[in-house]
Amino acid sequence: IQHKGDIISIYRHNEKLLKKTGDKVTAGTPIALLGNTGTATTGAHLHFELWHNGQSIDPSLYISF
């Protein structure tokens, strides 16, 4: 998802995507169903990343978990 400030959030290992490229989403809107894709997974989970200008960034600097 493209956010303000050129930040991109990435969500991997989804079973099914609920949004398409170009769809607008707001906080709380479901974007995908949790899945178990990949070759080294051991169960359903979410892989979450934040990126800025092509560099991965620590999500804890932006989100309170």
Image: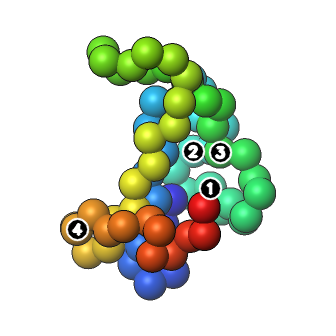
In the figure, 40 relative to 55: above or below? above
Disc marking residue 31? 3
Q: How would you rate the neighbour count of disc 3 (Cα within 10 Å): few for under 14, some for 14-19, many for 20 or more?
A: some
Q: Secondary structure at mark 4?
A: strand
Q: How would you rate the neighbour count of disc 4 (Cα within 10 Å): few for under 14, some for 14-19, many for 20 or more?
A: few
Does residue 8 appear anywhere in the picture?
no
> Residue shown at 72%/65% (left/top)?
26
Q: Secondary structure at mark 3?
A: loop
Does residue 34 appear anywhere in the picture?
yes
User: What residue type is disc 2 on?
Assistant: Lys
Name the residue that disc number 1 marks.
23
Labels 1 and 2 touching (C-beta < 8 A): yes
Cα distance between the residues tagged 3 and 2: 9 Å
Outermost residue toward the front?
65
Name the residue that disc number 2 marks.
20
Q: Earlier in the sequence, mark 4 or mark 1?
A: 1
Counting the numbered discs, the total is 4
Name the residue that disc number 4 marks.
55
Cα distance between the residues tagged 2 and 4: 24 Å
Rendered image quadrant of residue 28 = bottom right
